[in-house]
Each structure stands twice: as C-alpha cells, then as structure tokens.
Amino acid sequence: MCDFAQSVRDATQAMRAVFPATPLLRNAHLSEIYDADVYLKREDLSPVRSYKLRGAFNAMRKRPDVDLFVCASAGNHAQGVAFMCKHFGKQGVIFMPVTTPQQKIQKTAMFGGDSVEIRLTGDYFDDTLASAQAFCAEAGGHFLSPFDDEDVIEGQASVAVELVEQLGKMPDNLVIPVGGGGLSAGMLSYLGPQCQYTFVEPAGGACLHAALEAGKPVRLERVNNFADGAAVGQIGQKTFSRLQNVGLANTLRVSEDRLCTTMLEMLNVEGIVLEPAGALSIDALQDLGQSIRGRTVVCITSGGNFDFERLPEVKERAQKFLGLKKYFVLRMPQRPGALKDFLTLLGPDDDIARFEYLKKSARNYGSVLIGIETRDAENFDRLFGKLDAGGFTYQDITDDDLLSQFMI
C-alpha cells in the first residue's frame, strides 16, 4: 500500500492546480449534541458540489493519450466527468437516463460546455449503462466507471490526504457514506487501521452490507433511489476487494425517512444544503451515540446537489418519520353533520393537510382519504382513541408503501 499512498499524495498535489482542498470544519451544533468534536469534511463545497471530480481528474490525468471518455450517470459522476473533460480539453459522451431531472442535465451541460455530449437513453440506469458501454466499445473510447476503477479509487482517496493535513492528526472516528464504494475503499486503503470507521448506507441501497453477508458482491433485488448518490444495486468488484474485511459491525443502514430529518436539521439550523447521500454520515451519529463521546469524529458530507423541488417530499418524509403526519382512510357516513362530527374530534394542534373522497357512489357510507399534521406525535393516540370511541371505521396507511404509492 506504500505505492498507493504515494500515488494518492501525488494525485492530491496535482489537484491543487485545478481546485482547492475542500474545507474541514468543526460543527459546534453537532459537537454539543454528541459531546464530541465533530468535524464535517465538506465535499459538498467542491466546484461540482461533490467529491466525484476527484476520481475523474485522476483517471484523466493518467490517460493523456485518450481523447474520448464515456460514462453513464444520472448525477454527481456525470458532473465530475463533464468538469474534467472541459479542464483537460477531452471529449466526453455522457449517457443519462431519460428520466433524469432537467436540473442535473443542465448542470452537466454547464460544466462540460462544448467538451461533452449528453445522450438521454433508457428509463432505468441498467439500460443507460448498457448503451454507454456498447457505444464506448464501438467508438474506441475509455469507459470511466463512477467507482469500480483503480484510478478513480485513488483519486477519491485524496479526501483522506486533505483531512489529515487539515486536522493535524488522525481522527478517532471516521464516518463515510457508501454507494459503489469508491470513496470508502480509497480512504480505508490510504488511512489503514489507524482510526475507527463507520460505513453508512441508505437502507434501500445497502449493497456493501449485502456483499459482506454473502462474502462477495451481489445484486440487490430492489433499490430505493431516494438517496440517489449512494443507492447502488451492486458494490464494485475492485472496491469490495478493499472493503471485504471491514466487518458488519462497522456498517450502518439508515432509513431514508430519518435521513430527511437530518437534511432539514442541517438546512434549518446550520444553513447547509445536503443531498440525501451527503447527509448519511451526519445521520449516522444518532446510532453511534455515546460511543463517540469525547472523541474526534469526522463525517464526510459527500454531496450537496439537491434539487429544491424535492423539498416538499423531504419535509413530508421527515414528518412521517417523526410521527407528526399520518394518512388514513376513514369510512364516513353519508348523512348531514357527519363531517362536522369528525371535525369536533380534532385537537387544537391538528391540521387537515389532505381531504379527498375516494368513493361517492355508496348510498350510506363513503371512503375518505385524510392527511393530518400535528405538533406532537402523541396527539394521534388521542385522536385515534376518539375515533374508536365514536365508532368510526378507519385504516392508517401511513407506513403502507403499496397503498401510499397509489393513494397519496
């Protein structure tokens, strides 16, 4: 690993001609909560608002004779590749799913300018990836993987070089988000066993956890794409070879809904805009709790490419996780005054966020979809108690993913 470490330091030094080191900042708010020295390594403040340009830089730097780079990405990797294609004067063809939000397409185009061509193909990423690889083979370009590439891993490890230089010592605990494994594999390989690691994944895309259980990379049956910067269906072969001995005890899976509470907390309290994947390491502090008390902890905030059109969804998911918002289907008698009877059951802190008749043809009863927001989760115990006492028939569908998908 000595050669790897020196190569990472060389790559880090070369990066300084292109962009400055991202800051390492002590966060007083989090430090007070956890009675620890909590630092944030702010990869969300890179020129493309994620660490992905590091791997792209290193891979292109090492291939001066390659004129065409090809990648498949719907987000941060695409922007990193575009930025570096423009910097190195290379041509890039970036394949993105047809369903990619316009904001991400526009930012990729902005970073790459005339150096990149964006091709929208496939409804799902696997289709996009297949198209990109087929084109690359035909055109004779170099396919640049977002994580499963030794030069990309080496480039991402530059985060570790900067971190130690800025902190002036090794942290006691290092909390790293994991998607395909490029960042975590690079940092672990560079730093070695000198600190305590926690590798954090979204619950709906925990491909490292699955690989550790199976002893090899395996494809997840289903992936929740909410934390799209880390929601990967299968960890890389090269990255897993570096992570295979980390142990399940050092991995965490966090719920996407709880992640939303952390995103809102950092936005409202600290004014820090993080994408879901970028908030993973901070969210994990809740699980580490007392184990980090009095210690120096560094969380990698891996990205801040957040589309504010998603803010209402983030708020709703956070409210649901905290028990402050619920949806239920109520069987309402079709008689004058029935709605008034229901309204009298609501408390002073209960607000109707949604009210929709689902069936109006029944003569005696009708089903109503109701969304209620409140200030204290315990208020729902009181409300449901009153509904039971009043003989109302209802079903709480807040946590029913299938019904919620079609009705809410």
Image: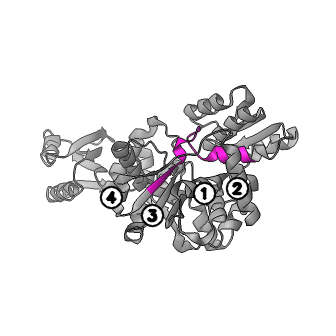
Of pointers 3 and 4, the one earlier in the residue sequence: 4
* Res 296 label: 3
Label 4 residue SS: helix
Of pointers 3 and 1, the one earlier in the residue sequence: 1
* Res 8 label: 2
Quadrant, the N terminus: bottom right
Give the residue pinned by disc 1: 160
User: For the residue marked with disc 2, what is the amino acid?
Assistant: Val
Give the residue pinned by disc 4: 32
| Tag 3 near tag 2, CB within 8 Å | no
Quadrant, the C terminus: top left
Q: CA distance from mark 3 to mark 2?
A: 24 Å
| Tag 1 near tag 2, CB within 8 Å | yes
Q: CA distance from mark 1 to mark 2?
A: 9 Å
Q: CA distance from mark 3 to mark 4?
A: 13 Å
How far from the left and from the top, in percent, is residue 373? 26, 46
Which residue sits at x=59%, y=38%?
48
How many numbered marks does the figure carry?
4
User: For the residue marked with disc 3, what is the amino acid?
Assistant: Thr
